[in-house]
Amino acid sequence: RRVFLDLLDRSCKRHAWVCHAYCLMPNHYHLLIETSQPTLSKGMKYLNGIYTQRFNRRHHRVGHVLQGRFKAILVDTGAYLLELSRYIVLNPVRAKLVRSAENWPWSSYRATA
């Protein structure tokens, strides 16, 4: 997971993204990314592709690692941005992986709380 977060940081820098929130779950992840240029598809291909290659190499396996293709939605208000940020960092609580979002080490909760 640290590898994924390092790749996310690299993707944000490489494509001039702003990451407002993230949460890594056992078989998928949630990102709230702001883009100033139409680079989302290219950046996601880089992020998912490099992560999958490294994961498969480390675990001596082949094939998909993550669930399906990414989904993108337009966030056009500050209120919706806040709502999505909450949804993302509370995902492990809803999935009953932890009692409190602050106990999940693989999200942006601690950085934004």
Image (cartoon, helix red, strand yellow):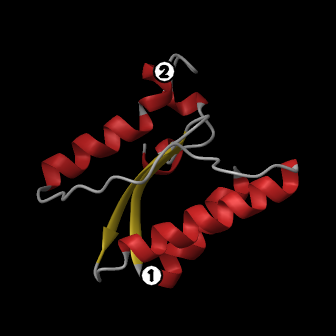
Tag 2–tag 1 contact (CB < 8 Å) = no
Task: Name the element at disc 2.
Answer: loop
Tell me the residue at 65%/57% (across/down): 4
| Amino acid on which disc 2 is placed | Ala
Identify the residue position indicated by label 2 in the image: 95
Residue 42 picture quarter: bottom left
Q: Nearer the viewer, residue 42 or 107?
A: 42
Can you tell which mark lies on residue 15?
1
Asked if residue 79 lies left or right of residue 47, the reply is left
Q: Which quarter of the image is occupied by the C terminus?
A: top left
Tell me the residue at 59%/33% (across/down): 104
| Residue 31 coordinates in the image, percent (x, y) | 42, 53
Asked if residue 97 lies left or right of residue 75, the reply is right
Tell me the residue at 63%/39% (across/down): 105
Residue at the farthest front position: 63
How crowded pointer 2 is (Cα within 10 Å; few <14, some 14-19, many 20+) is rated as few
